[in-house]
């Protein structure tokens, strides 16, 4: 049976590449692309729905646009923020911490994906394995934190990882075939990583397509025991 999948944040570098790889997979029947800037026309295999993960009403409205019998084999949340062109940037020290910037990063990286989970989880398939994957980050690991800094981004991803674990525990009771994971995509050449590319070795700076292929391979290899865990692009488990 062919699969139905959803990508939330499909207009970003990784989200777009995940979507393209899924569309080009003969095992996929329909790809639902959710984005704040959806301007593309629907096709037989691609359905576009507008969503703003910073607004709960928008998330609720987005799922209400789905056909009533929709059930997903995979839901991939590819949203996130590290910096912008205005006033958000990774903090280098305590003095850089700012309440409004902290709230914005937490809203996009933690609260938004959590609300996506709230409204999209009921659309996961139950009779066979289904996966709910969230883009996370290695810097969200408390165990792996040896450098400090990046207060907003680190804490937002750490909190997201806890949400993923919570989802995995609660939903196992009603849908034991569902797997919830966080995924670290590596350093991908994109708007998010652009200010930091000069510090990355050429062989460690991935194209979005390369990262997407690796992440989808990780998803394909997941087992039930992996639910609630965080994995890197190469399948390595990242400790909390």
Image (spheres, grey):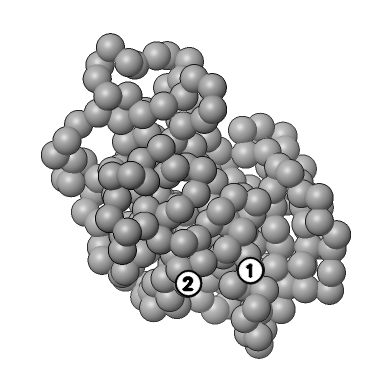
Vertical position of residue 175 compared to residue 163: above or below: below
**Residue 110 visible (yes or no):** no
Q: Are marks 1 and 2 in contact (CB under 8 Å)?
A: no
Asked where in the image residue 93 lies, by quadrant, the reply is top left
- Residue lying at the far left of the rendered structure: 146
Few, some or many C-alpha atoms within 10 Å of disc 2 (few <14, some 14-19, many ≥20)? some
The residue located at (76%, 49%) in the rendering is: 38
Residue 65 location (% of width, % of height): 81, 52
| Residue wearing tag 1 | 20
Few, some or many C-alpha atoms within 10 Å of disc 1 (few <14, some 14-19, many ≥20)? some
Q: Earlier in the sequence, mark 1 or mark 2?
A: 1
Vertical position of residue 217 compared to residue 13: above or below: below
Residue 194 location (% of width, % of height): 44, 42
Vertical position of residue 161 compared to residue 7: above or below: above
Vertical position of residue 240 compared to residue 41: above or below: above
* Left or right, residue 113 beside residue 72: left
Secondary-structure class at tag 1:
helix
Asked where in the image residue 43 lies, by quadrant, the reply is bottom right
The numbered disc on residue 213 is 2
Q: CA distance from mark 1 to mark 2?
A: 10 Å
* Left or right, residue 159 beside residue 72: left
* Left or right, residue 187 beside residue 240: right
Asked where in the image residue 37 lies, by quadrant, the reply is top right
The residue located at (68%, 38%) in the rendering is: 52
Residue 152 location (% of width, % of height): 37, 28
The numbered disc on residue 206 is none
Secondary-structure class at tag 2:
helix
């Amino acid at each position: 049976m062919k699969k139905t999948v959803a990508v939330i944040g499909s207009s970003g570098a990784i989200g777009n590449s995940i979507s393209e790889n899924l569309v080009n997979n003969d095992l996929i029947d329909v790809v639902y692309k959710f984005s704040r800037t959806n301007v593309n026309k629907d096709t037989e295999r691609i359905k576009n729905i507008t969503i703003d993960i910073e607004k709960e009403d928008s998330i609720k409205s987005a799922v209400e646009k789905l056909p009533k019998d929709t059930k997903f084999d995979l839901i991939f949340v590819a949203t996130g923020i590290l910096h912008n062109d205005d006033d958000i940037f990774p903090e280098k020290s305590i003095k850089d911490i700012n309440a409004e910037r902290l709230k914005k990063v937490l809203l996009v990286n933690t609260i938004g994906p959590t609300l996506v989970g709230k409204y999209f989880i009921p659309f996961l398939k139950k009779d066979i394995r289904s996966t709910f994957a969230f883009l996370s980050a290695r810097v969200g690991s408390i165990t792996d934190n040896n450098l400090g800094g990046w207060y907003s981004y680190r804490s937002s991803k750490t909190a997201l990882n806890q949400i993923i674990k919570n989802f995995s525990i609660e939903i196992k009771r009603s849908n034991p075939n569902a797997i919830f994971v966080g995924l670290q995509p590596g350093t991908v050449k994109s708007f998010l990583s652009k200010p930091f590319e000069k510090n990355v070795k050429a062989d460690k700076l991935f194209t979005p397509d390369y990262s997407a292929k690796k992440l989808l391979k990780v998803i394909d290899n997941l087992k039930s025991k992996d639910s609630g865990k965080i994995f890197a692009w190469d399948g390595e488990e990242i400790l909390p």
